[in-house]
Amino acid sequence: MSALPPTRTLADVTVGEELPPLVLPMTATRVVAGAIATRDFMPVHHDRDYANSQGAPEIFMNILSDTAYCSRFLTDWAGPEAMVRRVAIRLGVPAFANSTLTYTGSVTDTRVEDGRGLVEVTFRAANDLGDHVTGTAVVDLPLGDGAA
């Protein structure tokens, strides 16, 4: 098992910095597992025939899974000791099974508040239909050398 990457510090982060993309194949298994894990038993998330009867070409991801993957995108970049303090998302086009979501984002602000290093990030996850989710977040990082 590999070691966890180090946690970013506020001193390491610059406004305008691009976060590394996260590419997620939206398999049927991923869609169904997310729905089950979040106790969302709405049939459009696990029953293709039902989703088709509702006008959808395929099952699609639920909003709780969306929120989780947005948090993963942020913590993959920030590191294991980072704390996601706020996530605000807006849903767009569906994320159907057999599509691919690509998460991208950038740092829009950094500041020290109450002794904490806060980083604001704007992000999106898009697929072949357009923006699936857009959002903003605040991530709490250790201050690091030179940040005060």
Image: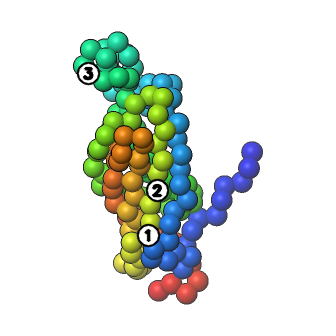
Q: Check disc 2: other Cα within 10 Å, few if <14, some if 14-19, many if 20+.
A: some
The residue sitting at 26% across, 21% down in the picture is: 55
Q: Amino acid at mark 2?
A: Thr
- Residue 35: where, in percent of width, then height? 39, 28
Q: Check disc 3: other Cα within 10 Å, few if <14, some if 14-19, many if 20+.
A: few
- Residue 88: where, in percent of width, then height? 30, 55
- Residue 57: where, in percent of width, then height? 35, 23
Nearer the observer, disc 3 or disc 1? Answer: 3
The residue sitting at 31% across, 40% down in the picture is: 93
**Rendered image: mark on residue 107:** 1
The residue sitting at 49% across, 38% down in the picture is: 100
Assign a secondary structure to mark 3: loop
Query: What's the CA distance linking mark 3 and mark 1?
Result: 38 Å
Which residue is disc 3 drawn over? 55
- Residue 86: where, in percent of width, then height? 34, 59
Is 54 or 141 nearer to us in this picture?
54
**Rendered image: mark on residue 104:** 2
